[in-house]
Image (cartoon, grey):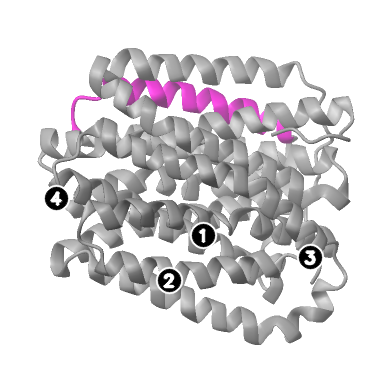
Amino acid sequence: MLQRGIVRPVRRLLLLVCSITLADTMLYAALVPLLPHYQEEFGLSKGGAGLLVGAYAAGALIGAIPGGIAAARFGPRRAVVAGLSLMAVASIAFGFAGDPWTLGLARLAQGIGSALSWAGALAWLVAGTPRSRRGEMLGTAIGAAIFGALLGPAIGALAESFGSRPVFVGVAGIAVGLAAWALRTPAVDAELQPVSAILRAVRRPLMLGALWLMVMPALLFGVVAVLVPLELDDAGWGAAAIAAVFVGAAAIEMVVAPLLGRVSDRRGRLLPLRFALAAGVLVTTALAFADHPAAIVPLVVCASISFGAFWAPAMALLSDEAERIGLAQGFAFGLMNAAWGGGNSVGPPLGGALADVAGEALPYALMALLCAVTLLAVSRGRRLLGTQLARVPGSP
């Protein structure tokens, strides 16, 4: 959503960035209702289905640092155009895929394109918006991304009904249109820095903490994206019904994300993050015991809100620390993509493999434990980090 009080050039840039993040997550989430179909067509185990889900994130992980370097050295606009072009080609390949290897490789390429477009788009947004509203701007971009996640399952259900080829060719057309729009938008300057600046940045505790807080929701969403569709499918739910669950959850999360970004601007980055971690413990514990759609569906909505509460404050914390230490924002968001890609490439296959071996309760219990340990670390480390946090906007 676009906020009042934003000047017109910033509003236009925000609209472009929101459109890019929306299209990206729409493509990512389109697989959710199609997963049972591909599992049956290609004879995939739950672990194999997890690998297919995780291929997109693995591509984002592979492209994360190169995407950050491209955004910093060649400028955000060029990184965005390159990423959208690759996503368009990969979407066509995904729609025409006839075997699991082609399908997986197309998802991998989509993820690489996503890393380029996200690093460029978010660095572009931070460079062109007021520092005091950074959390709100990033939260708005995340809200648009969540709206894309809302549309994604509907796109997947449409593909199951009318065929993958026309639907994913249409998605490719959207990516091409966004690339043309980006080329018509005024660019911002590149930030020339040596790649060694990334290595220096990741040795700083606050930077590492911010990156881990990006890994956590990626892990959590990755596990849910594999296990919940398969559990609901086992209960006799079709692709449209599964899509409706995720659409409803994403609709609520979309509204909450910009509000949490604004809270992080006014009350500090750590307050909403502590809420997210505490809620994550409760939700994943409940999912470990849920064995009926009547319990699973409302928990998916709660999971979407609590897991989604990480994004805007964690991204703003990462951007703040990059600014404080003089790291190019393109590099910072490249690291963000690496954190997200690492979490989401591990979460789906790990969740699926553990569920194959010991049932769905084990991966959920493991996620609850990670949330609890991270909450403890954030609470204990708050005083230690207080001095550094006080130097950046939005500190608690």
The amino acid beneath tag 2 is Leu
Circle 4 crowding by C-alpha within 10 Å: few under 14, some 14–19, many from 20:
some
Q: Which residue is mark 1?
A: 306
Observer-nearest of 163 and 243 = 243
Of the numbered discs in the image, which one, if any, rests on residue 282? 2
Q: Residues within 10 Å of mark 3 (few under 14, many from 20)?
A: some
SS state under label 2: helix
Residue 135 vertical placement versus 248 (above, below): below
Judging depth in this view, the residue of 186 and 357 nearest the camera is: 357
Quadrant in which residue 151 is drawn = top left
Q: Are marks 4 and 3 in contact (CB under 8 Å)?
A: no
| Picture residue at 25% right of the left edge, 71% below the top | 362
Q: CA distance from mark 2 to mark 4?
A: 29 Å
Query: What residue is pinned by disc 4?
Result: 45
**Residue 145 is one of the magenta-drawn residues:** no
Please identify the quadrant where the C terminus is shown: bottom right
Q: Is residue 177 above or below residue 333?
A: above
Distance between the Cα atoms at labels 4 and 3? Answer: 45 Å
